[in-house]
Image (cartoon, coloured by chain):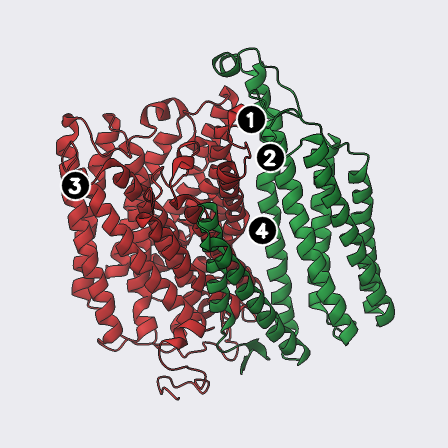
Amino acid sequence: MSEAHGGYYIPHGTTWPIIGSIGLTTLLAGAASLLNGASVGSAMMFAGVAIMLLMLFGWFGTVIRESEGGMYNAQVDKSFRWGMAWFIFSEVMFFAAFFGALYYARVLAVPWLGGGDEVTNQMLWNGWQAAWPTNGPADIGGEFETIPAWGIPAINTLLLLSSGVTVTFAHWALKKNNRGALVLWLIATVALGATFLGLQAKEYIHAYHELNLTLGSGIYGSTFFMLTGFHGMHVTIGAIMLTIITLRAMKGHFTPDRHFAFEAVAWYWHFVDVVWLGLFIFVYVL
Amino acid sequence: MNTATTHDAHHEEHQGGLLRWVFTTNHKDIGTLYLLFALLMFIVGGAMAMIIRAELFQPGLQFVDPQFFNSMTTMHALVMIFGAVMPAFVGLANWLIPMMIGAPDMALPRMNNWSFWILPFAFTMLLSTLFMEGGGPAGGWTLYPPLVLQTGNAFPFVIFSIHLMGISSIMGAINVIVTIVNMRAPGMTLMKMPLFVWTWLITAYLLIAVMPVLAGAVTMLLTDRFFDTSFFNAAGGGDPVMFQHIFWFFGHPEVYILILPAFGIVSQIIPTFARKPLFGYSSMVYATASIAFLSFIVWAHHMFTVGMPLAGELFFMYATMLIAVPTGVKVFNWVSTMWKGAMTFETPMLFAVGFVVMFTIGGFSGLMLAIAPVDFQYHDTYFVVAHFHYVLVTGAVFAIMGATYYWLPKWTGHMYDERLGKLHFWLSAIFVNILFFPQHFLGLAGMPRRIPDYSIQFTEFNQISSIGGFAFGLTQLLFVYIVIKTIRGGARATDRVWEGAHGLEWTLPSPPPYHSFQTAPEIK
C-alpha cells in the first residue's frame, strides 16, 4: 500500500474489473444471441450473470473490508461521494431520454400526426384524430384501457414517499448511534419498497390480462412500460442495496460520522423516489 | 519481482509481465493502455477509410459491394469516434491530469481500470458484427430508424457494444471530475488549473450528461426491433424523427466532447513555444463553459431538412451561430498568445498552429452549414463530410498528435526524432488537405455522402481526394514508427523538456516516477 497526501488510499492491482468486463460481455453477447434466436444465448446470459454476481460480491466485499479496516481517510470518502453524485446524475439523464420521448410524442408527434400538421395528416393517415392515450393511427396492439392514477399508483406514491421518510429516520438513528432503531427503520424502508414492487407487479399483470395494455400498445404502451419498467428495475436495485446496508448495519458496520455507503444508498433511494413523482404526474395523472 | 525502473521508493507494486497491464490501477499504466488502444483503433478505422477511398477512386462499383461499403462508412465513424479519438483523450487525461494538479493518482483507481478494460471487449463485439449474417451495421453511425432496424444479426450486438462504450465513458468521466474536484494539491485553485484540466472537467460533465441519453436512444431502437414498442413507428403514434432528436441531443454535445480536450491541448502547447503565458486565460475558461452550455441547445441543426416548424429552424440556426462567438474568443486568444512571441516551431507547435488554421476552416464551413436555408443544399453531401473531417482530423487528431509529440519525452524519458516529426507533420498537413479540401467542391456540386457510386463529373475531385487519402494513411505509419522508436530509445529528455514549458508535470523527472506526487507539491 502506498499513501500520499496524508494517506489517500491507492489500491495496487485489482482483478475485479477484468472479471466484470468478461461477465458483462458474456451477459450482453448472450442476450444478443438470444434475441437473434440462438439457443446458446440463454446459457451465456446465465454465465454472464453469475460472473457479474461474483464480481459484485468480490469488488464490494474488498471495498467494505478496506473501509472497515480504516484505510479510507476523509478525502477518499469525499471521492466516493462525488462519484456517487455524478453516477446518480447520469441515471437522471438516462430517465430524461425516456421522459423526453414521452413529451415529444404527446406534445408534438401525436398532435402533428392527428391533424396539427395538415400535410403529415393527409399524407400519412388522412382523417385520424389525435388523442392521448393512443396506440397510433394503425391501432397497434388493439384497443386498450389505461390504469387510473388514483388507484394503485396513488397508493404506490404514498408508499415510496413514506419510504423516503423512513430512510431519513434510519439516518437520524445512525447519527445518534441508535443501532436498534437504525435497523428497524431500514427494514421498514425495504418493506415499503418491496410492497411497492409487489403492487407494481400486480398492476402489470392486470394491465396485460384485463386491460390489454402491453408494451406493444403503440406509443402509450411503449412509454408507459419503459418508464415504469426502468423505474421498477431501479427500485429493485435500490431495495437490494438497502437490504445489504441493513445486513451491514446489523453486523455493526458504520459509525455516526462515517457511513458513506449508507448515505449513497439513501441518495439513490431518494432519486428513485423523485423519478416516481415525475412518473406519477406525467404518466398517470396528466 | 522488483523491476528496477524508477528512482521511486514505492515501486514494489509493479507486477511483472502482461498481467501488470490487466490488473493495474496506476494512472500512467492506464493512460498508456488507452493511448495504445486508441492508436490501434486509429489504424483499424483508417484501414476502413482506405477501403472507402479506394472504392470512390472511380465511378461505378470496383472493389466492394454497396452493403459492405455502407458498413465501412458506419464502422469507420464508430471506430474513430468511440475507439480512437475519445480513448486517446481519456488516455491523455489519465496521464496528465494527476501530474498537472499535483495528485498521486486518479481518485478512483479501480474504476479507472474498469473503464479502460471494457473497451477492448466493446470493440471486439462491434468489429465482430462485420462477420455476422447480414453483415455489419450499414445505416450510418447515427443509427437512424427505420433503416437501422433492417440490420441483420449484427443489430443487437451493435446496440450492446454502444452500451458498453457508454458505460466506459461515463465511468471515465466520473473519475476525471472527481479527480479534479477532490485531488488538487493545496493551493491549486480552480483558476490556476492548466487549461487542459479545465477543458477536460467540462468535457467530463458533457459526457455524463449525454452518454446516458445515447444509451436510452439505442435502448428504444432495441425494444422497437425486438419487443414490439412503437417509439419510432408512426403507425403506433411514435415518430422516426424523435430518434433523431434524442440522438442529436447526445450527438451535438458529443462533437464538443471530441474537440474541447483538443482546445485544452493547443492551449498548453502554444504558450510553451511562443514563450508567453496564454493570452486571456479566464476568457478561455468561460468560452469553454459557454460552448458546453450552447452545445445542449443546438442539436436540431443536424436535422434542418427533416421537417421542423419554422420557429425550430430559426431557433436552432441562431443558437448554432452563437457558438462562433466563444470559439472565436479561443482562436483570437491563441493568435494573441503567438503575437510578438519568441516563437520556435518544434513538431508539437507545428501541429498546434496547423490545428488553429485548419480547425478554423472547419469552423467556418460549420457556420455555412448552420444557415438553415443553405443547409438545405448542403445536407447529406460531401460538404458535410469535408466539414467534420476538418474539425475532427485537422482538429481533434492533429491536437492528439501534437500532444503526443509534446508529452512523449516526458512519458518515456526519450526525445523523439525531430526531423522525422517535422516530416510527419508536413506530409500530414499537405495530404490531409489534398484529401479533404476537394470534398468541399464535391459537396457543393451535389455529390451525396454514403454512396459508393457517383456521376462521372465528380471523378477528378474524387481521385485527388483518394490520392490524398492513401498518402495521408501511409504517412500515419511514420507516426507509429516514430512513437515506437521513441519508446524504445533516443536522446535523454530533460525534466523540463521544452525551454518554455510551465506546469507541474515538467517539475517531475522524465520519465516521471510510478506515483507522481507522493507529497503535495508547492503551488506558487
Q: Residue at x 54, y 39 (%)?
A: B227
User: How far apart, in angstroms, are the residues tagged by discs 4 and 2?
Assistant: 22 Å
| Residue tagged 4 | A90
Q: How many numbered discs?
A: 4
Q: Secondary structure at mark 4?
A: helix
Q: Nearer the viewer, mark 4 or mark 2?
A: 2
User: How far apart, in angstroms, are the residues tagged by discs 2 and 1?
Assistant: 9 Å
Are the residues tagged 4 and 2 within 8 Å (C-beta)? no
Letter of the chain that mark 2 sits on in the rendering? A
Does mark 2 fall on the same chain as mark 4?
yes
| Residue tagged 1 | B236
Shade of chain B as shown in the rendered figure: red
Tell me the amino acid under the disc marked 1. Gly
Among the 4 quarters of the image, the one containing residue B87 = bottom left
Q: Secondary structure at mark 3?
A: loop
Residue B372 visible (yes or no): yes
Image coords of residue B451 (percent x, y) = 26, 33
Image coords of residue A233 (percent x, y) = 65, 50
Q: Secondary structure at mark 2?
A: helix
